[in-house]
Every structure is written in structure tokens, then in C-alpha cells.
Image (cartoon, helix red, strand yellow):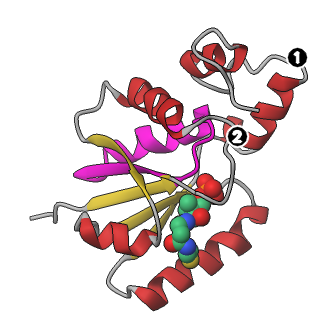
Amino acid sequence: MAKQVTAIYPGSFDPVTNGHLDIIERSHGIFHRVIVAVLVNVEKEPFFDIDKRLEMLREVTQEWDNIEVETFEGLLVKFALARKAQVILRGIRAVTDYEYEFQMALMNRRMQPEIETVFMVPAEAYTYLSSRLVKEISMLGGSVNGLVPSIVEDFLKGNKGSVRR
Ligand code: PNS
């Protein structure tokens, strides 16, 4: 019988993009339970505060029963252990992501060898997409239609609460 595997999908999600959502959608059919874990980084001022990032993520994942959205602080492996997760899930877009992801995966393995990092590749259309570019384009008045879920577009346009900074 297949094992019931819990995966943690960590990130800043500032904001969630269609690339993230593509990974979440692919993961929901593979893992028993997926916890989308939003990093609360006290040192870094985010574009969207944590409540808005959670609201957007919860809205866009509400159709899937086995996807949960939570925040975490501190070491990711500690959070994964606390949630009894066996897998850390990361999306890889291009070769440029690889070096950083490889480093993190090995460092996380060093700290917690029983937790496995699994990489997934999003649909080709999202391989050049990033939260950073979405924010930049939107702030400069460009369209991010098709790159982010509609709730994120609304938040970026300021139709749903204010955007920090
Ligand atoms: O989407 P991001 O910003 O690239 O996600 C990075 C994230 C949140 C996965 C990474 O910064 C992280 O795991 N931070 C938690 C602190 C930690 O465990 N650091 C050691 C990593 S080896």
C-alpha cells in the first residue's frame, strides 16, 4: 500500500502566482496532504503583509481538501518535523533556480536527513514567471493578467485592501 505522504510547500508567496498554483495543483494529486507554508520573515519587509498573503492563498486553494495553508517562522525543517511531513516540495523553473535549490535541499538534508526534498517543474508557460516580476510589472502599470489568480490581480490593483510600500 502506498504511504500517506505529507508535503510542505514553503515559500514567501509575496504574492502567489499561477506558477505556484500550478505546482500546488500538480502536488494535490500526488501527496496525501500538502501544507503550503508561508514564511514569516521578520527581517524582510514584504510587499503584502502576512494576512493578505494567507487570504489570497486560501482563496485560490479552497477547492482542494488536502491543501492547507499555514505560516511558519524559523527553520523550515523544524516546522516540517512538527507537522510530521516527510517531504519538502519546491518548484524549479529554470537552471538558474537549481544552484540555490540544490544548496537548500542539501543543507536541509544535513539538518534533517529523514526529510526528502522533491522538486517539481511547472507548466512551460510559467517558467519565466516570478513574484518579483509580477510586483514590478504591476507597480509600473503593466498587466499581469494570466500570470496571477484574479484575487491577486485585485489585491495588486488595490481593489482589495491596501498594498504595503
Ligand atoms: O519562495 P522563497 O522565498 O524562495 O522561499 C524560500 C524559503 C522560505 C523556502 C527559505 O527561505 C526557507 O526555508 N526559509 C526558512 C529558514 C530556513 O530554514 N533556512 C535554512 C534553509 S537551508
Name the element at disc 1: loop
Q: Which residue is mark 1?
A: 141
Q: Residue at x 49, y 27 (%)?
A: 56
Q: Are marks 1 and 2 in contact (CB under 8 Å)?
A: no
Q: CA–CA distance between discs 1 and 2? A: 15 Å
Could you tell me the amino acid type at mark 1? Gly
Q: Residue 23 lies in magenta, yes or no?
A: yes
Question: Quick one: quadrant of the C terminus?
Answer: top right
Q: Quadrant of residue 16?
A: top right
Q: Quadrant of residue 144?
A: top right
Q: Residue 25 lies in magenta, yes or no?
A: yes
Q: Residue furthest right?
A: 140
Measured as percent of width and height from the top left, residue 52 is found at 52, 30
Which callout, 1 or 2, points at the residue further toward the start of the chain? 2
Measured as percent of width and height from the top left, residue 136 is found at 84, 33
Q: Residue 131 has which mark?
A: 2
